[in-house]
Image (cartoon, rainbow, N blue to C red):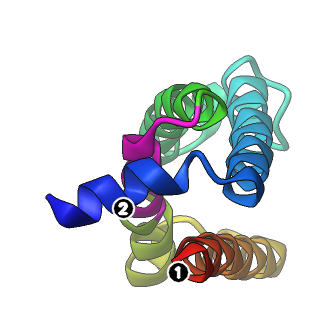
């Protein structure tokens, strides 16, 4: 419970609040990308993409929207949900099951860049929370 109080206190800090809003905007952008994919604005028409791509688009759209709003509102649980969600919904699938998400060499580069960016975002968040202490 002490760690939860620590997170509750963290969201009230100015720089952490700014960063949570920045993450919120990043996730909103991600939601827009998934909406674009679903309505057919992606490279491949959505109906022609593998079912697991479609499933990930829907799951990540919901995740991005819910967590984006919670980060914008600076809820303490959004920090936990963001971190766990990124690890479970993106970093793990895109590394352990990479072969299902890569059709071209460009896909591999994009996934590597996405994973790297997400790791950096999480490290910055953790650093800000620890530095607050």
Q: Look at the image and give the residue range highlighted in magenta.
A: 74-86
46 versus 120 height, above or below? above
Q: Looking at this rendering, what residue extends furthest in the left direction?
A: 1
Task: Give the x, y percent position of residue 86.
Answer: 48, 60
Could you tell me which residue is drawn at 68 percent across and 32 percent down? 31
Disc 1 to disc 2, how far (Cα)?
Answer: 10 Å
Towards the viewer: 31 or 52: 31
> Depth check: 84 or 2 in front?
2
Helix, strand or loop status at disc 1: helix
Q: Quadrant of the N terminus?
A: bottom left
Res. 33 mark: none
Corner quadrant of residue 25: top right
Residue 64, horizontal then vertical, whole percent: 57, 36
On whether residue 83 falls in the magenta region, the answer is: yes
Q: Is residue 108 magenta?
A: no
Q: Position of residue 79 (x, y in %)?
A: 46, 53
Q: In the shown orientation, is residue 71 left or right of residue 113?
A: left
Residue at figure coordinates x 75%, y 55% from the top left: 19
What secondary structure do most residues of the magenta stretch adopt?
helix
Q: Which mark is residue 130?
A: 1
Judged from the image, the secondary structure of the residue bearing numbered disc 2 is: helix
**Image location (x, y in percent) of residue 90:** 49, 63
Q: Is residue 115 visible?
A: yes
- Left or right of 49? Residue 105 is right
Q: Is residue 104 visible?
A: no
Query: Measuring 75% from the left and 51% from the top, which residue is drawn there?
Result: 14
Res. 6 mark: 2
Instruction: Spot the residue most to the top.
Output: 39
């Amino acid at each position: 419970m002490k760690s939860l109080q620590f997170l509750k206190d963290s969201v009230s800090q100015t720089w952490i609040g700014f960063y949570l809003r920045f993450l919120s905007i990043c996730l909103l952008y991600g939601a827009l990308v998934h909406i674009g994919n679903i309505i057919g604005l992606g490279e491949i028409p959505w109906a022609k993409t593998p079912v697991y791509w479609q499933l990930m688009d829907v799951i990540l759209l919901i995740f991005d929207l819910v967590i984006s709003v919670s980060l914008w509102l600076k809820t303490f649980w959004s920090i936990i949900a963001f971190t766990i969600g990124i690890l479970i919904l993106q970093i793990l699938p895109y590394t352990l099951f990479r072969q299902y998400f890569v059709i071209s060499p460009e896909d591999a580069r994009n996934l590597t860049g996405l994973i790297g960016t997400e790791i950096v975002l999480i490290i910055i968040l953790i650093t800000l929370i620890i530095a607050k202490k």
